[in-house]
Amino acid sequence: MSPRQSRTMGALPGYPMAGLKERRMELEARGVDVIDLGAGDADLAPPPPVVAAIQKAVEDPAMSRYPFQVGLPAFRKKISWWMEKRFGVAVDPTTEVLPLIGSKEGLAHLPFAFLDSGDVGVMPDPGYQAYRGGTVFAGGEPWMVPLRPENDFLIPLGDLPADVVKRARILYLNYPNNPTAASAPDAYFRDAIAFCREHDVVLVHDHAYSELAFDGYKPPSVLQFDGARDVAIEFHSLSKTYNMTGWRLAWAAGNKGLVGALSRVKTFMDTGAFLGIQAAGVAALDCWESWVPQNIAVFQRRRDRAVAAMRRAGFDVVVPKATMYLWIPVPGGEPSKDFQRRCLDQEGVIVLGGSGLGDGGEGFFRVALTVPEERLEQAAERLGRLI
């Protein structure tokens, strides 16, 4: 007998990577050379100072105590220092910063503080599953807005139905964007702030790719713009910038009331990130200026080689200014899930069909720049055989 699951569980979408790992194992057992361009999990190492910091921290018994939501004061102070140095944004380390066990849990937990039954969370489609999952679990209604090329992959706030705007309590934005790799102009952030102030909506900006940008582009923080401190909370992560995806360390910063509400929710959900990981976070932010540029250069070389190779193979590829992804139209109008399946079964290449990240992603597939240039070129050559 299987226990009956809740209606909430039934309202959740499937996980976009479901079944891929198992299928990969089957193919590799048969001797197939699989190139995995699916998950945004790079093959690169964290900075050496970060590794040294965690090695030192695990030997300190004080680091094994409960961190609670206060966490490591040195990490909070370092976050405040970095936000001001990088964006010119001053945040109080005690009241306007909150360490997280990865940004995903913070993004998913925030709706518990602001949504009641019937309230709406407006979010991008396709988009990060945490937005939708957190909204559903909190009892709210996800309003999925398709990200389309004709809108530059931005949510057209002026086109939202009046009833949705009336019930909206949270707006999720993510620029630079996963999976489309789109960036937002400053004017868009200003419009989003004005929209949220007018309609009493919490502006949630997922800024996980703030540092993974190329050709001199420096993505702004939403907190840089006038009025943002009234309505906005921004989420930052060490996962992509420092190749620390499995370490699970991030933070939220912004409006004091929003940060405090999230902290209260988390008090009932977890006891904070391991203090040793937070000590490693201090080391990561300390080497931001000296180490991060060389890491970004690796991704830029991968981007350039992958774009050229995919174009040679016959795909229509836009050069992204940021993120570790290419967002590519599926040739010939084939459903993206079917194309994803053919990529793996016929050519041994894992890509992510756009519809796996939401119905709005149909017609596209995502390539993650998570393997060396030579493997990216091999993958492009194989994929070209499918079209």
Image (tube, grey):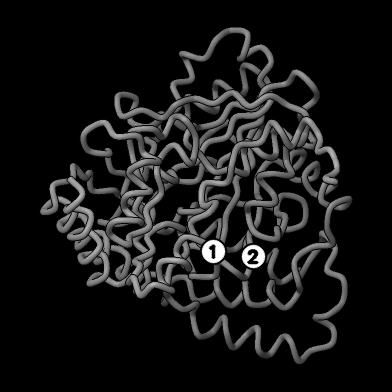
Q: Quadrant of residue 260?
A: top right
Residue at mark 1: 239
Graded by Cα atoms within 10 Å as few (under 14), some (14 to 19) or many (20 or more), the crowding at tag 2 reads some
Circle 2: element type: loop
Q: Position of residue 172 (x, y in %)?
A: 57, 34
Residue at point 56%, 31% (across, down) = 123
Circle 1: element type: loop
Location of residue 323 with respect to 5 vertically, above or below: below
Q: Quadrant of residue 186?
A: top left
For badge 2, the amino acid type reads Arg
Q: Quadrant of residue 277?
A: bottom right
Instruction: Say left or right for 289 vs 364.
Output: right
For badge 1, the amino acid type reads Ser
Q: In the image as oriented, which residue stretches furthest toward the top?
A: 162
Residue at mark 2: 248
Residue at point 66%, 36% (across, down) = 12
Which residue is at the front of the view, 377 or 301? 377
Graded by Cα atoms within 10 Å as few (under 14), some (14 to 19) or many (20 or more), the crowding at tag 1 reads many
Q: Quadrant of the C terminus?
A: top left
- Mark 2 or mark 1, which has the lower sequence index? 1
Instruction: Say left or right for 64 vs 300.
Output: right
Q: Are marks 2 and 1 in contact (CB under 8 Å)?
A: yes
Residue at point 52%, 62% (across, down) = 22
